[in-house]
Image (spheres, helix red, strand yellow):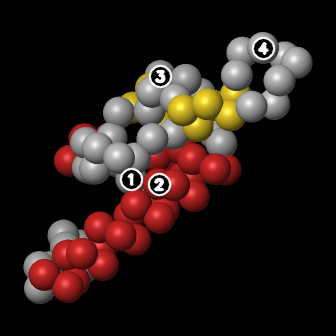
Amino acid sequence: MKNASSYVRSPAKITTVKRTGRGFSLNELKEAGLTLKESKKLELYVEKRRSVWLGNLKIIKRLIKKVVMTYEVMGFELEGS
């Protein structure tokens, strides 16, 4: 999924503007229920930062729901189902 992008805070302490980040943290992926292997299959970039942003969790969960729905429509079975 090339169009999935994360959000991070701007380094300037004065602004509260969100900007797009490079990827998602490992902790965000774990909280969303994805493993590193699964995130690579979805072509998500994983950063080494440790923070967890609720906005990024929502993006990941929405992406997972979209992938599951696509597989169900196409008639494929997901592993572990």
Instruction: Please say whether residue 25 is visible from this viewpoint.
Output: no
Does residue 30 lie above or below 13 as drawn? below
| Element assignment for label 4 | loop
Amino acid on which the number 1 mark rests in the picture: Leu
Q: Tell me if 47 is positioned left or right of 42 in this view.
A: right
Q: Residue at the spot x=57%, y=58% of the render?
A: 58
Badge nearest the viewer, 3 or 4: 4
Ranked by sequence position, the earlier of labels 4 and 1 is 4
Mark drawn on residue 34: 1
Instruction: Please provide percent x and percent y for residue 46.
Output: 39, 32
Q: Residue at the spot x=29%, y=67% of the render?
A: 67
Task: Quickly name the residue at label 3.
Answer: 48
| Element assignment for label 2 | helix
* Label 3 Cα neighbours within 10 Å, binned few <14 / some 14-19 / many ≥20: few
Q: Tell me if 20 is positioned left or right of 63 in this view.
A: right
Amino acid on which the number 2 mark rests in the picture: Ile
Mark drawn on residue 60: 2
Instruction: Please provide percent x and percent y for residue 5.
Output: 45, 41
Task: Using the numbered discs, state the Cα–Cα distance from disc 1 to disc 3 in whole angstroms.
Answer: 16 Å
Does residue 73 lie above or below 35 as drawn? below
| Element assignment for label 1 | loop
Task: Quickly name the residue at label 4.
Answer: 12
Q: Tell me if 76 is positioned left or right of 5 in this view.
A: left
